[in-house]
Image: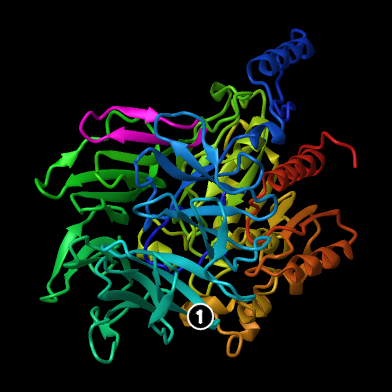
């Protein structure tokens, strides 16, 4: 479940992160040997568009780079710190910039492990790891000799990295060891790992620390539409948070980060229109200045180590568009030499002569590239797509908009199987993203491409309440969840039924987290609309979910309650929109998939729904992973889940498999 009120748009929809019916309803077939013609067409389609198993799709290798506040390049500039699931479980690797083979730096076989930062001047590094997906991540150091040490021990501790000081002698970590509901800031010595607390947090979100260690930026959400930024001067006697976004009405503010010269804070705001703009706050004068605006949300602003280069990302209709500026000259720097794709994770080396980044497209997972800043020549370091897959056999997405019950246009990302046609109609799925307030975006999804490859059209609907389409659209579902947003999903089916290449009698609904809730809600509250449902760790009882949120969400608990409802005062409505209490209405086949260690949507949410629907004598399949949390990180489990999706859909939607 993604929190709706966070004002800065990130790449959302975890990668599930985040299908072919050959029957025809034509009433006037060609009279000359229609069966022979259909068989010939099917043979051609099978030859031109081969199908791949889930195992083949998930033999892809996923890559991500070090934390954006850390050092992705080693001190000698020869390697980049990567996290990869090449072994089946995410581990940390050193990737040579010359493109030679990566070297494994951790060897976990059970828990996903992610690289955080190289040390600035030697071969040590920081990495993070939780336990079976429970989200209680600790921060570890790996010494030059390969030995490791937990820097944030404790049974119920959650910790994260906040960056390096400009002196490179100190790094900062957040930890909730003092109070499970609040993250304090600790300064660690890079030499011996001794530490001291520098900010005891009374209940804010800690967003950034200035490079000189003087300023701390905090965000305080009040409602899903209203939040503030506070600054703390750690050199002041009282270290009191000072409000810098005093305003009236509902305005959402968020933090991008401090500039490298310690002079300004770059922040986001929707004060001046529908979309999020980037502004700066001068730490000396208090003056505010516009930095960047567009007809879409400014999703991120980042800087190179010296601040010379500024990267600005725009969330343009579910696709990231990035512009680089030379802050010395004000000129734009070209990224034209890079292949076409959706870029992310921009990481400079210390000299700013090289830029590493991830690049993905609809038909290829993210790969790592290194770009020479002067030469503008790039080197591709990874090839993540399984070589058993011919990229030409995958599909590109398209952006479509369909009218909902009140005429509101619902933007969606659409995937059409290659073999689909008016004479070869295919079943379809309405895919609902997580949230509340997430967004389905363009880009590679092994889960979706696997289903499309097996003949299922997938319409990833961005129902009202989704981010990326303006603040009015974003708040249209506030305290109307399971009602107006559900009707957007119902009308997605109506749209699919208008397409001559979709089998209008075979349309299901699928989603994870909040999207899983929407699946259960659709089957319970609109039981005649969809033919099947696939619920991936979806909320079924809002009363329980909202009273059992992880303690580390305390800083935005009030805003979450404003968005969804407070169980203490809004219990009747929460029960009314909770599918569990209306499970007797569910009559269509259901697949439920859940991680046992999920701290956001507890396993009991799925357990009870399965029991209740089975009591209706309705087919229910249940897949439970004992070693996963909210999202499946182990490659083997992702394969099992995708095989379960396809088997269930083939049996109950396509009708190809006998029960």
Residue lying at the far bottom of the rendered structure: 238
Residue 190 visible in this rendered orientation of the protein: yes
What segment carries the magenta color?
364-382
Q: What residue is drawn where x is 34% and y is 54%?
A: 120
User: Relative to 502, is 407 above or below?
Assistant: below
Q: What residue is drawn where x is 75% and y is 27%?
A: 23
Residue indicated by mark 1: 557
Q: Quadrant of the N terminus?
A: bottom right
Locate residue 286: give its quadrant.
Answer: bottom left
Does dot 1 land on a helix, a strand or a loop? helix
Magenta span dominant secondary structure: strand
Locate residue 269: give its quadrant.
Answer: bottom left
Q: Is residue 213 left or right of residue 578?
A: left
Residue 122 x/y as whole percent = 39, 51
Mark 1 is surrounded, within 10 Å at the Cα level, by few (under 14), some (14 to 19) or many (20 or more) other residues, namely many
Q: What residue is drawn where x is 70% and y is 62%?
A: 520
């Amino acid at each position: 479940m993604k929190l709706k009120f966070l004002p800065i748009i990130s790449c959302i929809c975890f990668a599930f992160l985040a299908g072919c019916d050959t029957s025809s309803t034509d009433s006037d077939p060609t009279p000359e040997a229609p069966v022979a013609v259909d068989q010939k067409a099917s043979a051609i389609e099978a030859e031109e568009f081969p199908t791949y198993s889930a195992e083949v799709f998930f033999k892809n290798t996923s890559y991500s780079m070090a934390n954006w506040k850390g050092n992705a390049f080693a001190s000698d500039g020869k390697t980049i710190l990567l996290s990869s699931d090449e072994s089946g479980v995410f581990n940390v690797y050193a990737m040579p910039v010359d493109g030679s083979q990566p070297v494994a730096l951790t060897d976990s076989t059970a828990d996903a492990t992610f690289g955080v930062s190289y040390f600035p001047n030697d071969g040590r590094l920081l990495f993070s790891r939780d336990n079976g997906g429970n989200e209680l991540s600790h921060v570890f150091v790996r010494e030059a000799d390969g030995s490791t040490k937990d820097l944030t021990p404790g049974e119920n501790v959650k910790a994260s990295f906040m960056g390096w000081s400009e002196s490179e002698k100190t790094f900062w970590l957040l930890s909730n060891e003092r109070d499970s509901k609040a993250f304090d800031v600790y300064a660690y010595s890079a030499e011996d790992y001794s530490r001291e607390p520098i900010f005891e947090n009374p209940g804010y979100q800690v967003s950034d620390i200035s490079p000189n260690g003087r300023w701390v930026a905090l965000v305080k959400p009040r409602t899903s539409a209203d939040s503030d930024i506070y600054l703390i001067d750690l050199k002041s006697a009282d270290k009191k948070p000072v409000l810098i976004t005093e305003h009236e009405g509902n305005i959402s503010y968020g933090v991008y980060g401090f500039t490298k010269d310690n002079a300004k804070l770059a922040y986001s705001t929707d004060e001046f229109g529908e979309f999020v703009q980037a502004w700066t706050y001068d730490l000396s004068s208090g003056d505010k200045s516009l930095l960047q605006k567009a007809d879409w949300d400014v999703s991120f602003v980042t800087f190179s180590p010296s601040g010379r280069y500024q990267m600005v990302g725009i969330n343009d209709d579910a696709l990231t568009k990035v512009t680089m500026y030379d802050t010395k000259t004000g000129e734009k720097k070209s990224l034209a030499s890079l292949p076409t794709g959706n870029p992310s994770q921009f990481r400079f080396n210390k000299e700013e002569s090289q830029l590493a980044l991830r690049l993905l497209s609809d038909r290829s997972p993210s790969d790592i590239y290194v770009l020479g800043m002067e030469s503008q020549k790039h080197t591709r370091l990874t090839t993540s797509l399984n070589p058993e897959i011919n990229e030409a056999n995958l599909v590109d997405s398209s952006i479509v908009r369909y009218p909902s019950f009140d005429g509101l246009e619902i933007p969606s990302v659409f995937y059409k199987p290659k073999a689909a046609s008016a004479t070869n109609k295919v079943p379809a799925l309405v895919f609902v993203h997580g949230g509340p307030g997430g967004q389905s975006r363009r880009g590679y999804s092994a889960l979706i491409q696997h289903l499309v490859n097996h003949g299922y059209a997938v319409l990833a609907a961005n129902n009202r309440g989704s981010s990326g389409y303006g603040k009015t659209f974003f708040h249209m579902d506030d305290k109307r969840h399971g009602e107006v947003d559900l009707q957007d999903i119902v009308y997605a089916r109506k749209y699919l039924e208008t397409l001559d290449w979709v089998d209008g009698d075979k349309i299901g609904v699928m989603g994870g987290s909040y999207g899983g809730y929407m699946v259960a809600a659709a089957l319970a509250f609109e039981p005649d609309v969809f033919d099947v449902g696939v619920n991936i760790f979806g909320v079924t009882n809002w009363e329980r979910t909202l009273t059992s949120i992880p303690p580390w969400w305390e800083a935005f608990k009030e805003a979450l309650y404003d968005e969804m409802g407070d169980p203490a005062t809004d219990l009747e409505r929460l029960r009314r929109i909770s599918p569990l209490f209306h499970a007797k209405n569910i009559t269509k086949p259901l697949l439920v998939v859940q991680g046992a260690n999920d701290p956001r949507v507890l396993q009991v949410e799925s357990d009870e729904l399965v029991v209740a629907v089975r009591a209706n004598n309705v087919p229910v399949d249940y897949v439970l992973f004992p070693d996963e949390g909210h999202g499946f990180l182990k490659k083997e489990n992702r394969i099992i889940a995708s095989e379960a999706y396809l088997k269930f859909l083939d049996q109950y939607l396509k009708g190809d498999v006998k029960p």
